[in-house]
Every structure is written in structure tokens, then in C-alpha cells.
Image (tube, coloured by chain):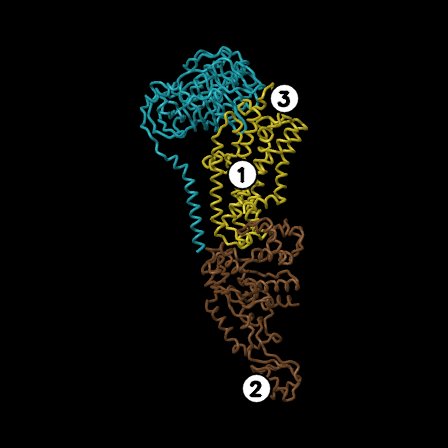
Chain colours: A brown, B yellow, C cyan
Amino acid sequence: MIVTRALTKRFGRITAVHEVDLNVREGDRYGLLGPNGSGKTTLVRMILGLVYATSGEIEVMGQPIPRRTNEVLREVGALVEGPGAYAHLSGRANLTFLDASGPGGGGSRKARRLRVEEALTRAGLSGVDDRPVKTYSLGMRQRLGLAAALLHQPRLLVLDEPTNGLDPQGIREIRDLLEELNANGTTIFLCSHLLSEVEQLCTRVGVMDRGHLVLEEEMSQVRSPTGRVVVHTPDADRAVALLDGGVEHRDGARLLVRTADAAELNARLVREGLRIDEIHVQRRSLEDVVLEATGPGSDRLDAEPAEPAELDGPGVHVDGVRKVETRPSASTGTGTGTSLSPGSEPDAWQGTSREFLE
Amino acid sequence: MIVTELAKLVRRPRTWVSLALLCGLPAIVAIFLGVTEVAPPPGEGPTFLSAVLSNGSLYPAAALAMVLPLFLPVSVAVVGGDSIAGEAGSGMLRYLLLRPVGRTRLLVAKLIALTAYVMLAVVAVAATSYAIGVAIFGTEPASALAGSELITSVSGTGLSDVQVALRITYTVLYIGFSMLGVGALALFLSTFTDSPLAAALGALAALVTSQVLVTLDAAASVQPYLLTRYWLAWVDFFRDPILWRDIERGLALQAVYVGVLLAASWANFATRDVTS
Amino acid sequence: MVRGEARRRWLLVTALVAALCSIPFAIAAFPVAGADVDPQRLRGLILGSAERPYQGLAESTGSLGIPDLPGLDDATGLLGGTSRMRVWYDAPENWRVALVTATGERDFLRSKTGLAIWDYESEQLTKIQGAQTVRLPNAADLMPPDLGRRLLRLSTPADRLTGLDTRRIAGRSAAGLRVTPADSATTIGSVDIWADPETGVPLEVRIVPRGGSRAVLTTRLLDVRFARPAASAVAPRFAPGVRTSEVDTFDLLARLASRTTERMPASLAGRPALDSTPSIASVRAYSGGYSSFVVAPLPGRYGRRVFEAARTAGAGSLAVSRGEALALQTSVLTAVLVREEAIGRTFLLAGPVRPDLLRTAANELIS
């Protein structure tokens, strides 16, 4: 659906996007994650033909961008960096104007009105009155932006931070809506800095960091078992003795046991008469994977700044992917698990995701 | 797209506020003149103002002369500067382009909407000032003898009502067309910036420069190419016979300005990164 | 890829601008056709062109820079700036010249019965009875055909006639002619006239000062048509109710004449006086080819005002035997104000002549 090859964009001396090879397949719910300033928005704008690439190629639905932008965009719905609207008009008037501005805006007056109403209903704004948009809350504006993106039954939905300003119920609604659209064949390309949003919705994930695409993987791959089982037991000492070297890490009553088969481990411990509070297969969390693959966000300014992006060789990109792919062995040293990440950097990005989850 | 742009123009409160201001100045002047009956001597103050005391049907010409140097170009520059930069400012530019609306199409639609605004503005000024002029000053010249020729042209000959109406129509069209150069300049600048104010101010700066150079003898060599060089040529419609030379040049010059600036806007906007 | 596209588009726009900008230059560089005409023949053609009707628009640019003297602004403004005039010329005694300004117009209408002047700014039509041999210059005098013929008539066989390169004026090829006055008393270095070689109607006239290269007065037709103008254009019907007045003379000279009874001598500095209208006998012109000049007595208080204005304007003083004299000099035009303290008489002498000639005349006047 979306393929980019060695896509690079420079604004003056700053390289915003560096040799990105993105691949979004038809039917995907693709989540592009990355801290603020990592080049996500620029990438999205290039894909939509708003910003022109310095070098590299873009294909959307098999058509080259920007040469065939206008053909492609007829089947694309988009929400880029917040909604836009004429503040002195009502939401309905805004959609009507937008509908009438472009191609496919034809049809009778009635057909057009129906189309606008349907988009409003889908975005949860069906009851909106004729108040001007300037009186709308942030969430309402966001919904209006979504309604605009849905106006023409797009085959591809490109959404940049779609849940910005929505309350938890709203986020849930939007997620359900996107899942429903996806089930009906709409490919969804979603950009976010919120881990949970991507984690809950997407089937595929890409991670941007300082202009590079450092990871692109199936969500099922990301969340694969690590080959370890987490056991909480009041009889931790006995368990360590029993498993003899099988325990990789102990933290009070919590043990990390190297084994692929949790059921077998459970049976064995119970057989020995140990009491078990909790036992589960350890899985990689998206947060770990992403933090592993990226550096601090660009809005964080340390005294010793991280290596600037343009100094990174193209090898880093390859490196990053490899790092993730060989993850099971590499992770041994760092220690994983959502519940146990005292060493993780409390960076801005993570902070946001925490805030959000609360 | 063009219909949408026009509808947007009509539904903008600002359009009507600016038109009300444009029509307001001649109305205020007319009221003062009507109350005091003190007209400036001919040749001083706005053209034709001296003549309207005796006959209000010439007031549209005087009203246009009043708004021509400043009010009209300012409002046109504001609307023109808003055309692309304003869309960028409200965040709608990207959604229009994603809709998709071709960039060239968008420019042309904006220029057409701008033209419509200009014409609306000059017609509104002419119409309201005619109504006010007739209401306050009447249509009977004080010194006229019986006859159909009621108004004296600049050349001293009599003009019939039909001729006056026709020449005022020409004036309205000519002044409207003269404003297109300013509008196109503001439109051009508005493809460079996301701030409508910057674009409008840029156009006004160019306008003031041009108006200063037009009066400067030392700049005689560039004067035929200045944006405002032929603005005052509308007075030639009220000579007998009409002096077409400057009017023709004025029209051609404005057409060249509009053409070149539209081409430059297109060259810039069609290949520009939209990051607003 | 897009950058290349952008470059191409800007190139296209630049090319468009360049093409549009070069149009005026291309027109100016368009080669002129027609062989040069023999100067003597051209002189004859020009002098015989008075009956040719024409209509068009003329522009005159003067840099004579005469200080504004009270009551003389109309004439000095004409010679010291740029003016535009529309003209409809049917015959020597049937024409109309309209001096066009940004906010008004002043029309000079000549008919068999005399000259009429319509002034839009005062909304008045003034009819002048009788012909005048001495008057202040007005816009009609600056029409290239009229000025060209008038200047050529002043030339004497002693003056040198040379041909000038053919130029494009008002869209026509115009043959050129230069008169270099032999008279050493005049400040005129040369008079250049370009005329339509078929009709002989002058299209451009330039006056170049002696020793200078740039013209101090250029008057040129911007548009011209050699067709008989419509009667309604030459003699438009004025609106009923237009204020009309009739006078013997229109300008400052009329006012001067009515206030002085001075009689001018029949000759001054060896130059004979021209006939003058009986009503303004006190103002006289003294003819001597290009070194002609005019003398006007200025009535008491007005004379003092002009004298002081000239002094303030920085006029240099001139030594005369009995009295005080000031000379205002531009590259071509010289004006001398001479004042005889004892009787309180003031005279204005002006012409395209050297100051010493006017001094001689002034001395003769007050002696």
C-alpha cells in the first residue's frame, strides 16, 4: 500500500528523514511510533505529497508520489498534525465545503448532505449543532478532523496522532471504529508517540528515531515470548535450590526462570510442594522494544547531546534492525519485563505514555 | 472549487465588514458635505468632489476617487494576502490539498475569488455612494438650464444621464481591474508565508513604494512599469472625447502584473513544501 | 526530482518576465524605414505644413527651471515640468489643445472668432477677442508642429541647417533637421526638429542651449493621426449653464497693460519692435531672429513684489548705469528685471538671449 525506498528529506542543514524504507501492506493496521521530532510527520507529509522528498522514492497504491498524487489522494483519508477548520463556520459547513472542494464532490445536494451526515455520525458528531468550530473542544475538533478523513470511504487512512485530545472513552470509540473500518478492507497507517495506542490497535509497527526507521516488524513478532517464565512464590529460596541454575534472576519473591514451557515448570514446582502466587510466560513488551531501538526524544535537551542524526551512518539503521532481530540472546544482559525496568530511561516519551495510561 | 471559494468569501464576516468600511467613508464625507455645503475648490481634494454639491449622480466617481489611494488597495491586499497564507494559518491548506485539490487549481480559484471580491467592493462603493449622493445632493444642478445635459465633463461639455451612467460603469470596471495587480501581488506573497498579515503588509509596502516613485520625477524611466502608474487614468473617462491611451496602458499593465505574479505564484506554490 | 521541477518552473517564469520586459526595448529598437530627407527640402515641407490637419497626444518636458515669479506660474510651470496635451488641429484658425492634468483640464479652443479657454478648475469659459502678437506662452504653443514651424520661421539664411538621423516618433519614421543659429546674441545652441517626411508636420522639437548637449525643452507627439478631426472634438458644445466671460486679453500681460501707460520705444538694442494690439501697446516684443526678446513694464507695487521675489530666488545683480538690475538666467532663457529708483519704474525683459544684450536694452530703457 505504501512503499518508500531510501526516502530522505533535508530542510536546509537538518535531515528530518534519513533513507527510510517503509513498507505498509494492504490490510495492515500499521503503527508508526517515534518520539517527538523523530521525523514521523515529515514522513507522512511526504507520503501524502505535501512535502517533496530530497531523494528516494514513494509509492502509494502502486502509484509514484508526487507524480500521481492527485489520483492517489482520491482514495486516501488523512488527518495530519491536528485537524484544520474554518473557525467561524460550523463543523457541518466545514465538511460541506471540504466535500465540495475536491473531485468526487458531485452528486445531488441530497447525496452530499447524506455523505457529510454519515461522516459526522461515524466520528461521533451526529448531534452537533450549528455552533462555529471556534467554540468546539479539542476532542470535538479531533472528531471533526476524523470525519473529514472518512468523508469519501478511503481505501487508505493516514492518521497522525488521531486520539489527541480525546478522553479515554473517545479513544476507545475511535479504536473500535478503526478496527471496524480495517475489517472492511481499509488499510490504516497510524502515527503516534503513544505506545499503548499502537500496541492496542496495530498489527504492524514501525519505529522512527531521529529520522531513521529503526524497526519495522509484525506486532506478533514484537510480542513474542522471550524463553523465560516469571514465577512469584513465597518459597523462593527452595525454588532457586530446586531449579539449580535455571533461575536467571531473583528479586525477593520474584524469579526469572529460563524455560520455554511454563506449564511444565508449574507442574514441577507444584509437584515439589512449592506455593505459587503467580506464573506466566515472559513476553517482550512494545515499550521495551521501542526503548531499546531508540534514543531520547529530540525535545529532551541534555547537556551532552546524543549524536546528531545526520552524523549516523546508514549502518545504524541496519544495526538497529539486527539488534531487534537477535533480541532473545541480546536481552539476557539487560533484563526485561514491564514490571521490572528500574534501569529504563524515564524519557519524555515514556513519561507521556505513563500519563496517558493513568 | 471556484464555487466553494466564492461561498467561503460570502460566508466570511470579514468580507462584509471590509465592504461596510469601504462604503462608510464616502457616506461620512457626503454627510459632512451635505450638512455644511462647503466643497473643496476644484483641483483640490478628491476629484469631482466639488461637482457633487450640485449633482449627486456624479458622487460614485468622487467616492471611488476617495477610496482608491488607500482603502481599496488595503482591503484587496488583506483579502489577497489571506488567500493561501490564511488557509495555511487555519490548518485547512493541507486538508484542501489532501482532498485532493490541485495546487494550480487552488491558486486560480483564489484569484477568481479575489477578483469577485474586488468587483463586489467597487460596485458596492459605487452603488451606495450613488444612493447617498442622490439622497443628499439631489440630481438637479443648481446652475443648469433646462435640457437633458445636466453634468459638465472635465472638458466642459455636457454629459447626458446615459453618458454619465456609462462612464461611471467604465470607471467602476477600470478601478476594479486596477486593483487586481495588488491582489495578485498579495496572493503571490501569500504563497511564501503562513502569515496572512505578512503577505498583506508586503503587498502594501510594494504599493507605497510604487506610489512614491510615481510622483518622483527622478524615477521617470521606471514609471511606465509601476503598479500604480495608471490608477488615476480613470479621470480620462470624464474627458470629452474619452482619452483612451492611459486607460489602455493601465489595463495592459495590470494584465501583465496579474499574469506574471500568477505564474510566479504557481512556480513557487506548486513545488513548495506544505509544512503548515 | 521536485527541485528540478521547481527550477524549471522558475526558469519559465523568469523567461516570461524577461520577454515582457523586453517588449518596450524591442519596439524602441525596431528599425526605422525611409531615407533621410535633404534638410533644405525638409525645412520647406515643415514651413508648408500648417494646413495639414492632425490629432493626437503630445508631451512636453522642460527644464528651464525659471523661479516662480508672482503671476507668472502658469507660464513658468509649462516650461519647467512635464505637461501632456491633447490636440485636434483642423486648420491654423480652427483647433483645440487640451492641457491634461491628473485632476483637471485646461482647453485652448481656437476658432475664426478668436481664442477661448476652458478652465475646469475654475469652471469657467473665457473668450478672448482679437489676435495677440505678444502674450505669455501657453500649452498650445508647445505643440511640436506649431513650435517647430515658429522656430523655423525665425531662422535666417545665415543659420546652418544639417540633417539628423531618422527616428521613430509616435510610431512613425521621422526625418530630422538641426538649425544652428549664427546669431551670437542668442543662448539657443540648436533647434532640432523631426518631422513626418510625407506631410512635413513636426513630430518632435528640441531646444538645446549653446554649449550644452541636453535639450532644455523637448516636446513630442506620443500619438498622432493625420486625419481631419471631428468637428465635435475641435469645437465641442459646452454644457448649458457654463460660466462664460469675454476679455480682450487673458493673461498677466492684460493686467499689466491696464495698469501702466508706459510707451515702449520703437527699437531697443538695435531690434525693431513688433506691432502690438492697441489695448496692450505698453508690452512689446523686439524681433531679431532667435535673439528676440520681450519687454513689459511692471506697475509699481507689483513690480516691487516681482523684484523682491527674484532677489529671494537668488538672481544675480547686473550693472546698469542708472538704477538696479537683477538677472535670472537659465541655460536658455534670460530674464532681467531693471528698476529705476528715482521714478519707481520696473521693467521685465526676457528672451533666449545673452544677459549683456538685455543689459544694453535695459540701459536704453531707463536712460
The correct choice, above or below, for A20 with respect to C153 in the image is below
Residue that mark 2 sits on? A245
- Left or right of C56? Residue A134 is right
**x, y percentage for residue C360?**
43, 17
Q: Residue at x 46, y 63 (%)?
A: A5
Label 1 marks which chain's residue? B
Mark seen at residue A266: none
**x, y percentage for residue A144?**
62, 56
The correct choice, above or below, for C354 with respect to C259 in the image is below
**x, y percentage for residue A146?**
60, 58
CA distance separating discs 2 and 3:
119 Å
For marks 1 and 3, the one nearer the N-term is: 3
CA distance separating discs 1 and 2:
87 Å
Give SS at disc 2.
loop
Please state which of residues A113 and C348 is positioned toward the viewer in this rendering. Answer: A113
Residue that mark 3 sits on? B142
Q: How many residues crowd around disc 3 within 10 Å: few (fewer than 14), some, or many (20 or more)?
A: few
Residue that mark 1 sits on? B179
Give, as a three-letter code, the residue at label 1.
Met
Give, as a three-letter code, the residue at label 3.
Ala
Give SS at disc 3.
loop
**x, y percentage for residue C120?**
55, 24
Give SS at disc 1.
helix
* Same chain shared by disc 2 and disc 3: no
